[in-house]
Amino acid sequence: MMLARTAERRATPTLPAAMPGFEHLRRFWDPGQNCMVVKVLPGEFYVGAQDELVSTVLGSCVAACIHDPVRGIGGMNHFMLPEPRGASDGWSSTVGRAARYGSDAMEQLINAVLKAGGQRADLRVKVFGGGRVLAQLSDVGQRNIDFVHRYIAAERLPLVAEDLGDVYPRQVQFFPQSGRVRVRQLRRSDDVALVADERGYLKRLANDPIKGEVELF
């Protein structure tokens, strides 16, 4: 038993360091994926240029994956629009706060990719999420979608793939070096029901590996 454990420890490779500024994110070696895995939670983003995997889970949130295919640099963000807090807090003020937060998330990601060596002329964008998963806030996902489409168009960035809308949460895995993305829609009834507490749901599912059918982008 001791020999087996020693061999297992020896088989685990030395973990490459994260780029400066991303040391606080959870990173670990996944033997099943045979690569580093980075978990991105709501309000976070990550940029890398190594053979690694960036993972998140989305309900009504949106994640943008931005990639420079020439230099093999890419990153993912995850932003959630704020919810109304009462009758006096109408959708106009909510959307204003949401757009500013979404804009910050996009700008931070783009700037981090450029700082890592990416070139703006070569950037490509893929976007995911915006599901209608909260019945009491049925248009939050659509407002996320509308925002990210407007932002990408205004910044004149090429949108090369998307999987947006519908009524299901999604699990997304992004490979920043190659730009490849795997997406699985979570269609079980208990998956959808759990989104009523979306933040807790996202944190729980963020630790689950993707299983079953996936869509490649």
Image (cartoon, helix red, strand yellow):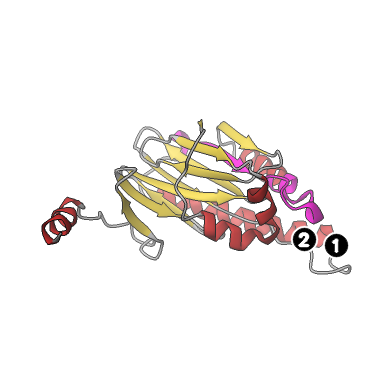
Split into 4 quadrants, where in the image is the N terminus? bottom left
Amino acid type, residue under disc 1 in the picture? Gly
Residue name at image x 60 percent, y 58 percent: 201
Q: Are marks 2 and 1 in contact (CB under 8 Å)?
A: yes
Q: Outermost residue, right direction?
A: 87
Residue name at image x 70 percent, y 58 percent: 196
Residue 25 appears in which quarter of the rendering? bottom left
How far from the left and from the top, in percent, is residue 49? 33, 45
Residue name at image x 66 percent, y 43 percent: 168
Left/right placement of residue 24 relative to residue 99 reads left
The image's mark for residue 152 is none
Reading the image, the residue beneath label 1 is: 90
Viewer-side residue, 92 vs 189: 189
How far from the left and from the top, in percent, is residue 2? 13, 61
Viewer-side residue, 111 vs 34: 34
Reading the image, the residue beneath label 2 is: 94
Q: Residues within 10 Å of mark 2 (few under 14, many from 20)?
A: some
Boundaries of the magenta span: 120-144
